[in-house]
Structure formats: structure tokens, C-alpha cells
Amino acid sequence: MRSKMRVPLSLALGAVLVLTGLVATPGVAATSGVAATPDVAPPDGTTTARVTARAEDVVVSARITLPSGGDVRGSITGTMTITHNGTSAVVRTGNMTMRDPAGRVLQGSQFVAAGTPNAWNSTVPLPTDAEPGIYGVTLTAQVDVTTDDGVFTVPIRITDPVQVPFRAKRSIPLIWLSPAGALAGATISVSGVANIRSLSDWETSPAANQEVKLYFDPTGSAAETLRATLTTDASGFFTSRQTPEGSGTWRMEMPQTNSGIRAVWTLSNTETARDRILREGSVSATEGGFTAGDHIMTQDVVVGLDPVQRRIDVGSLGFTIGGTSGWVSAESQRGEGAYPDGYRVQQDLRHSGIGTSNVYITFRATHPAGVYDIGIRDAMKACSAPDWDGNTGATSNCTHNVLVEDPTVATIVVKRASTTTVTASPTSFPAPRNVTVRGTVRRVQLVSTGGVAERPAPGVSVDLYFDPTGSAPSELKRTVTTGTDGTYSTSIRTATSGRWIAKYTGTSLVAASQDTVTVTVG
């Protein structure tokens, strides 16, 4: 048997890199036939380079297949698979070589049989400080091909480096809302901590200085929108203050880059309806170089004869969590009735997840009405870094004590309830005429026996509006005053169908109220 070696006549065919559907020649950037949006990149996957060589009539096509970056652990093994027009082939010598993002040349082992026909492996060990990114891949090999005419040695070379991205796995396993459930219109914190997996040892570490895009997809038909583009800090932490428009889903995305695989995490947001004015405020403190803080949100209170429980939500600010002790207080700014020196109540915080706490405070009509200061004392823990357990984020490194305390983080208004009624006589008539509009105003008030009762409200103003049927706005027609028994009555010409609306505007201590009655003309 004779062995022949010839210079490959078709080496000029070059190498072709196929990366998840994109095709590029060495040194030329890959382009796609589909326009890409700014935050979408080709998915991570196995990469393949091909080269064809010829010696006389012997043709060898070699394909080197590389793992995706997320599967790399300490080394990169390339598998060279060949096809040829001989009867058998063997790799006499050769290996794969890489140049890492730091410019270092990494030599691979000699090709060894991969265990499947016409396939050989060359393994490139990675240094402990190997970084993800673009690696330049070359290879040389001598392939002996047996034919009917003898053994021909065909040199296979990729000398112009093929640029291959080895992307590290990234994830956002720790995400939270502060607080987890918010009142309509309230501002919340959307936070998370991202990690990245090392190519050399698969250990996870904070994904520092990484871009994170924050999207919100509201429940219903409205489209998802980009709300913020953030950058993680040295701990992999990111946060954004947001005011969602109702319930929906938050989506946090780390777009794919040359060094990192795309990572997406989602979290549901449930908004709580409110019927009073929203009140919120923030407080923070710094101890030992670490800062922690809370954001308080609640709403005003209208209390009748029955007590009212008002929920106060507390959301942690920054990379912090609530401690093991703390409370929220409510203190009136005025005295009244059985509480001439004012009234103060506090309830222990109930921690219900990372960055989320709440309390319920009961208000009674016997308590002073008016403005209340909402304060907090929270023994918080600031976090220096996430403590990763595999791919799961934990908060065991949140060990830095910061006491957050302020007696007036927000204020709410507590008012006693009122009730307004209205009737019309008659309510249906064929043509314009005068209509008698009458009603009552009653309010909850302190009584001399020490309790509370609902009593008539004498001498208060009631605004009478008429809201005509159709699109025209309501219009103030008359203001009347209640008598000593809390009643009012007046005659008003009514020419069209619509609604009479009686509004009592209330006071600084008594809540507003209103009622409606419908009339039909014609």
C-alpha cells in the first residue's frame, strides 16, 4: 500500500461557521435575513465549522462541532467528524487550538477517537479565570484516507480563526416585589439578583454589570411595554421603582450577548383596589456603610358605627429584608372625646416574604378623627451579596443590622361617616314642571355618654346637581342648608330626564356622602 501526500487543491474553499441558523465566513460578521429587535439575539446552541480539502482525487470534508457555552465546564471538547470518498480514514495527528477573549492561546489535546465512526475529539482545557465571550477556533489535522489506489494523506486546516461565542449561563433566580401586593396607584420596588455560571468550574457568582430589561404585561388586552433598562451592581442586584397600571406580569430579561445566554424570569403582580385617597412615604437609615429602608403605603379611613381594619403595607427598599422585630404605629394629631391627649396604637410587623411586611390597625369612631401620623420601627438586614446554593438565590448573607425608625413616614386622614339621602316628587311626568327635591344628612358623632351614634346634621350645606341623560355633564343647580332635624327641601324646575344628585362635602372630621334619584320627563 502506498501513502501519498498532496497540497489540498480546494483549501481555498475555506471554513464555514454555522451558528443556530446564521452563516458566516471567517473574519466576516454573520447577518440574518430577518430583522432583529434591539433586545433579541440568536439563541445559544452548538456551533459547527466545516472545511473541505482534496489530495488528487481524494476529497475529505471535516466538520468540527463545539458545545454551547452553557454546557462548558472546565474544558471545551470539539468533535471532528469527516466524510470522504475512500474506503476508510484515520486521523494521524492534529488538534484544535483556541484564542480566548484575553488573547491567550489555548492548545487542545491530540485528536482521539470519539467512539463513533469517522469522529475524533480534541479537548482544550480552560484556565481557572477563563471568561465567556468570543473564542477564535483553529485546527490542523493529518487524515489518512484509504482508497483502492492506496493511502492518501490529506491535510485539514482552519488557519483563519473562526469566531465562536461561548456564552455563560445566566439566571435571575431571586426576584421579588416590595411589597408583594400593592394598592392601586402605589409605587412598588421590582428587584432581583442575577447570577452567572463560570466556564471553568461551573460555580455561580453574581452577574455584575449586566443589562436587565424590565417589562410589564398588564392583565387584559393592553400590550406589554418596556418599563426600564437596568444594570446590575457588583452583587448582581438590580431594582426599579415602578407604578403598575393594575395587575399583570413583570418580565425581567437579560438579553443574550456574546458572553451570556439570554435569561428570562417572570413574576405576577396583583393590585388591590382602594376606595380612599392613597397615602405613602419612605424612610431609610445607614449603619456601618449599609443602607436599608422601607416604603409604607395605605389609604384614608372612613369609620362608621362599626370599626374599620386598615391594612398598611411595607415594602423594603434596596437589597434589604425586614428583620425579626418591628412595628407600625398610628398616632392622632389631635385629642377628642375619651382621648383628650390623642390616641396612639402600634402593631407588630408581619413579614410575608422578601421585602414584604404588613400590619392591620383597627380604627373606631370613638377614636379622635383627623390626621394620623404613620410611623415605623423595623430592625432590618442589609445584604452584601447573594448566597448561592446551586442555581437558587438565598439571603443568608443579609446579615448587616440597620435600624430603620421614624414616627412620621406618612399621614392618613380618619373621618367619621355621614349619610346623605335624596328623593324627588314626582319622579315621572309628561312635560317640564317644578319638582320637589328633599332629603336628609346624618353623621356619626360622639355623644355625651361616651360612645358614638348616627345623628341628624343640622345647618350643613347640600349641593344639588342635575345630570341630564346623555353625554352632557352634570351641573350645579342649587345649594340648600339642612334644618335643625338634618333635612332639606326645595322646588326646582326640571325640563329633561336625568338624575338629581345631592352632595354633602363633609368637613375635616366628617366624610363626604351623596345620593341620587332619577326623574323621567315625557
Image: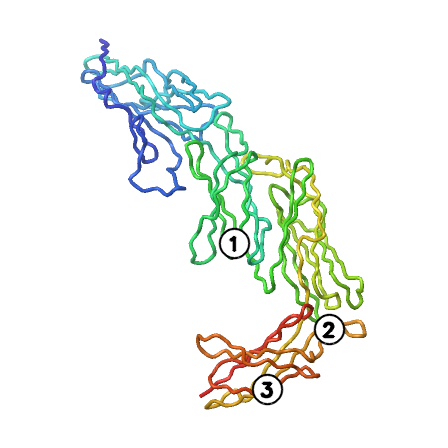
Q: What is the number of the mark on residue 244? A: 1
Say which of 70 and 58 sits in front. Answer: 70
Asked if 490 appears above or below 83 in the picture, the reply is: below
Q: What is the number of the mark on residue 327? A: none
Looking at the image, do the residues carrying marks 1 and 2 touch, with CB atoms under 8 Å apart?
Answer: no
Asked if 457 appears above or below 81 in the picture, the reply is: below
Alpha-carbon distance for marks 3 and 2? 27 Å
Say which of 327 and 469 sits in front. Answer: 469
Amino acid type assigned to the residue bearing label 3 in the image: Thr
Alpha-carbon distance for marks 1 and 2? 38 Å
Residue in the image at 63% along x and 60% along y: 299
Residue 341 position, x and y percent, is 80, 62
Residue 73 position, x and y percent, is 47, 26
Residue 362 position, x and y percent, is 71, 62
Quadrant where the C terminus is found in the figure: bottom left
Horizontal side of 161 relative to 378 (left or right) equals left
Residue 506 position, x and y percent, is 65, 72
Horizontal side of 44 relative to 515 (left or right) equals left
Q: What is the number of the mark on residue 445? A: 2
Question: Which colour scheme appears in the figure?
Answer: rainbow
Q: Upstream in the sequence, badge 3 or badge 1?
A: 1
Query: Which image quarter: residue 91?
Result: top left
Residue in the image at 80% along x and 67% along y: 338
Q: What residue sits right under mark 3 in the picture?
A: 490
Amino acid type assigned to the residue bearing label 1 in the image: Pro
Label 2: which secondary element: strand
The image shows a total of numbered marks equal to: 3
Amino acid type assigned to the residue bearing label 2 in the image: Gln
Alpha-carbon distance for marks 3 and 1? 46 Å
Looking at the image, do the residues carrying marks 3 and 2 touch, with CB atoms under 8 Å apart?
Answer: no
